[in-house]
Image (cartoon, rainbow, N blue to C red):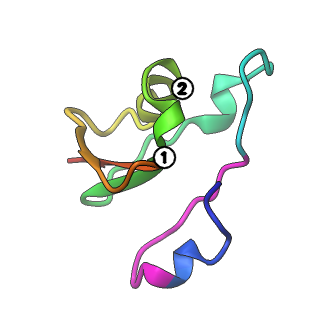
Amino acid sequence: MIGDDLPLEIRHNTVIPLQPFLDGDPIDSSDYRYKGHAGPLYIVLPTGYRGAKAAMILGSFSGYHDFDESKLSDRFLLYRGN
């Protein structure tokens, strides 16, 4: 789990915390839509989100394409979109 203190480490950026969702939870993808583009976008996700969950979240940012994935640790991944 990512703590609520993570945004304190990110300066001069907007942080959008999302509540974790479990397999089988109903998800309304319209709740996760962002149509803007404001420079590079960085998304930190637990490694367990790799695959369908990450694709759903990354797909929510229609102004961004070609996300790069980097491993931050055994527990977290960083996605960067332009």
CB under 8 Å between discs 1 and 2 = yes
Q: Where residue 3 appears, x then y in whole percent?
A: 65, 67
**What residue lies at 43% left-to-right and 29% top-to-bottom?**
50
Q: In the rendered view, tell whether residue 59 sits above or below residue 6.
A: above
Q: Nearer the viewer, residue 15 or 72?
A: 72
Q: Where residue 16 appears, x then y in whole percent?
A: 58, 59
**What residue lies at 42% left-to-right and 38% top-to-bottom?**
61
User: Does residue 26 appear to the left or right of 76 in the view shown?
Assistant: right
User: Does residue 28 appear to the left or right of 45 in the view shown?
Assistant: right
Read off the residue under disc 2.
53
Is residue 12 inside the magenta stretch? yes
Q: Where residue 71 appears, x then y in whole percent?
A: 29, 48
Q: Quadrant of the N terminus?
A: bottom right
Q: Nearer the viewer, residue 25 or 29?
A: 25
Element type where label 1 sits in the image: strand
User: Does residue 17 appear to the left or right of 62 in the view shown?
Assistant: right
Q: In the rendered view, tell whether residue 71 sits above or below residue 4.
A: above
Read off the residue under disc 1.
45
Element type where label 2 sits in the image: helix
| Residue 66 - label | none
- What is the residue that sits farthest to the front in this orientation? 74
Magenta region, residue range: 9-19
The residue type indicated by label 2 comes to: Lys
The residue type indicated by label 1 comes to: Leu
User: Does residue 62 appear to the left or right of 33 in the view shown?
Assistant: left
**What residue lies at 25% left-to-right and 57% top-to-bottom?**
40
Q: Where residue 47 appears, x then y in whole percent?
A: 46, 39
Q: Nearer the viewer, residue 6 or 37?
A: 6
Q: Earlier in the sequence, mark 1 or mark 2?
A: 1
